[in-house]
């Protein structure tokens, strides 16, 4: 239990108490500079619509984006053609100052499985024209779904040029699995945050505004709908539920900081209104169907997890450890029992040929020691083996069709088969695990260590620590193809990108085939 008075005091100190709950409306806004400086975005397509997003910010590095605490009308239009002549939906929304003048439009009533274009206007300013699409109708036959899987984009450690190449792949969706921003500096490189660690709401708003202005990230947001989940760096490294990395921090202040981080996340992403946070809580896990072909379940592995087991005395968070009894605790959970039950129901009800489960980390067991001793990193699923067993048991019990689990976090590529029991070489394979490298964030795993790791973990079929990049995933009724796309460098905006390896999963045959 937290002290309510202390919590409210912490909210006030961090700039989180509503400043303009009944803001006056400015009907004819005049802007000091171009207000659509952070671009436009779309997300969460359904068979008859999608979410549209923008934020008014003529001075994005200033408090409130350089705007007065007034509500500002924003008009939106959706068209069936790029020239925006065939307007099929339109309306007006008030951009409220208490939500950083962001708008989230949930468009409905459109045709399934087709492209649309959209734009915003406010005052005499017009946004760039964005492109998006609706999902296929429920039960519709679908020939192909192409996704971009991405994770971990540290602004200071490189340019987001991978997104320029991803856009050329003409994807239907981007699936982002965490660390959209970094709350602090970790080994700065080619560019700078220009500010210290994000603590307050204004800090997080400035951090998102900085990342959003990367031209390659902005272009991919404007052209393709996104699905997103968060990991830790959208708030704080290695946090777990309501447990801080800093043991001495009062829980009231920790949750007040989390409220600011979650609020800024919502303000800067094309999320459904149902995902808008209430204080330090936000419901972001969901399912997105894609006709008969696929169902995508987006999970939240941060907000509800039990603390990482066997923590060090001087800090919270993850740890490298030889097995301990606490790691094997049956009640430990990565997703929280409510989300676990929802996922079980969602997968059991799925009639899709492919079931894609997107979460933040490497799902497969990764034993880091050679020989009889086992060592694990506890901030990933290896810290929660009972929870992993429950998920695998759910897949097996419900005879889930073609489950593929996707993640990121470790800043390197991993491609694995998932056995029911990773310690039993005769255990049946029940799913595939695809973990993507980072967009820019550096890895700590040396290439020379991979051979021994793969020998120790035979269910892991491929690992590569050399490249930053993304994964291009193409799903058809017959197979899933995963192309691992590696950047030549992230220290240049114009670096080349190449496919370093490709793997296929055939319909009805769990396991991997290297191409």
Image: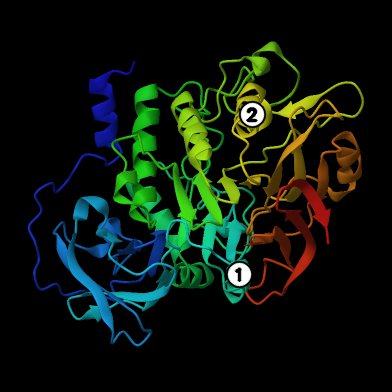
User: For the image shown, how many numbered marks are present on the structure?
Assistant: 2
How far apart in space, not on screen, are marks 1 and 2 (Cα)?
Answer: 31 Å
**Residue farthest toward the top in the current orientation of the protein:** 325
Report the side of 437 relative to 80 (left or right): right
Q: Quadrant of residue 79?
A: bottom left
Q: Which residue is mark 2?
A: 388
Quarter of image, res 255: top left
Residue at position x 47%, y 28% in the image? 341
- Image coordinates for residue 274, horizontal then vertical, percent: 31, 45
User: Which of pointers 1 and 2 lies earlier in the amino acid sequence?
Assistant: 1
Relative to residue 302, is residue 60 depicted above or below?
below
Q: What residue sits right under mark 1 in the picture?
A: 166
Residue 157 relative to residue 181: left or right:
right
Q: Residue 451 falls in which quadrant of the image?
A: top right
Residue 92 screen position, x and y as percent: 17, 67
Residue 72 badge = none
**Above or below for 116 versus 67:** below
Which structural element holds mark 2? helix
């Amino acid at each position: 239990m937290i002290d309510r008075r202390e919590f409210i005091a912490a909210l006030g100190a961090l700039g989180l108490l509503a400043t303009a709950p009944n803001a006056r409306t400015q009907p004819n806004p005049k802007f000091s500079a171009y207000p659509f400086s952070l671009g436009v975005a779309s997300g969460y397509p359904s068979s008859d619509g999608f979410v549209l997003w923008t934020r008014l910010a003529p001075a994005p590095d200033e408090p409130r984006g350089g705007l007065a605490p007034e509500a500002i009308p924003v008009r939106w239009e959706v068209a069936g053609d790029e020239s925006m002549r065939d307007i099929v939906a339109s309306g007006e929304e008030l951009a409220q100052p208490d939500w950083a003048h962001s708008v989230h439009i949930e468009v409905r009533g459109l045709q399934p499985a087709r492209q649309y274009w959209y734009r915003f206007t406010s005052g005499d300013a017009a946004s760039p024209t964005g492109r998006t699409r609706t999902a296929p109708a429920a039960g519709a036959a679908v020939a192909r779904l192409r996704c971009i899987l991405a994770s971990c984009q540290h602004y200071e450690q490189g340019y987001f040029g991978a997104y320029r190449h991803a856009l050329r792949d003409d994807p239907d969706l981007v699936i982002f699995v965490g660390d959209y921003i970094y709350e602090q500096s970790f080994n700065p490189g080619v560019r700078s945050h220009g500010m210290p660690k994000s603590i307050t709401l204004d800090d997080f708003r400035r951090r998102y505004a900085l990342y959003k202005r990367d031209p390659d990230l902005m272009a991919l947001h404007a052209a393709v709908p996104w699905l997103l989940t968060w990991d830790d760096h959208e708030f704080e490294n290695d946090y777990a539920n309501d447990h801080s990395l800093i043991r001495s921090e009062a829980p009231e202040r920790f949750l007040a900081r989390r409220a600011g981080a979650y609020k800024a996340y919502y303000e800067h992403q094309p999320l459904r209104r149902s995902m808008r946070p209430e204080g330090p809580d936000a419901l972001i896990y969901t399912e997105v169907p894609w006709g008969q072909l696929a169902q995508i379940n987006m999970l939240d592995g941060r907000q509800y997890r039990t603390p990482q087991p066997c923590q060090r005395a001087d800090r919270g968070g993850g740890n490298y450890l030889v097995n301990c009894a606490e790691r094997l605790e049956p009640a430990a959970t990565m997703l929280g029992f409510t989300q676990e039950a929802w996922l079980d129901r969602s997968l059991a009800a799925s009639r899709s040929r492919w079931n894609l489960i997107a979460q933040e980390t490497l799902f497969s067991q990764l034993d880091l020691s050679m020989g009889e001793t086992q060592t694990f990193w506890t901030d990933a699923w290896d810290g929660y083996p009972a929870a992993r067993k429950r998920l695998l048991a759910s897949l097996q019990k419900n005879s889930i069709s073609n489950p593929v689990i996707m993640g990121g976090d470790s800043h390197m590529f991993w491609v694995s088969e998932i056995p029911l029991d990773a310690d039993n070489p005769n255990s049946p394979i029940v799913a595939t695990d695809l973990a993507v490298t980072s967009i820019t964030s550096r890895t700590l795993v040396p290439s020379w260590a991979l051979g021994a790791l793969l020998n120790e973990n035979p269910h892991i079929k491929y690992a590569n620590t050399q490249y930053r990049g993304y994964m291009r995933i193409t799903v058809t009724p017959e197979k899933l193809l995963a192309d691992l796309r590696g950047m030549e460098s992230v220290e240049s905006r114009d670096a080349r990108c190449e496919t370093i390896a490709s793997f296929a999963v055939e319909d009805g045959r769990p396991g991997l085939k290297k191409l």
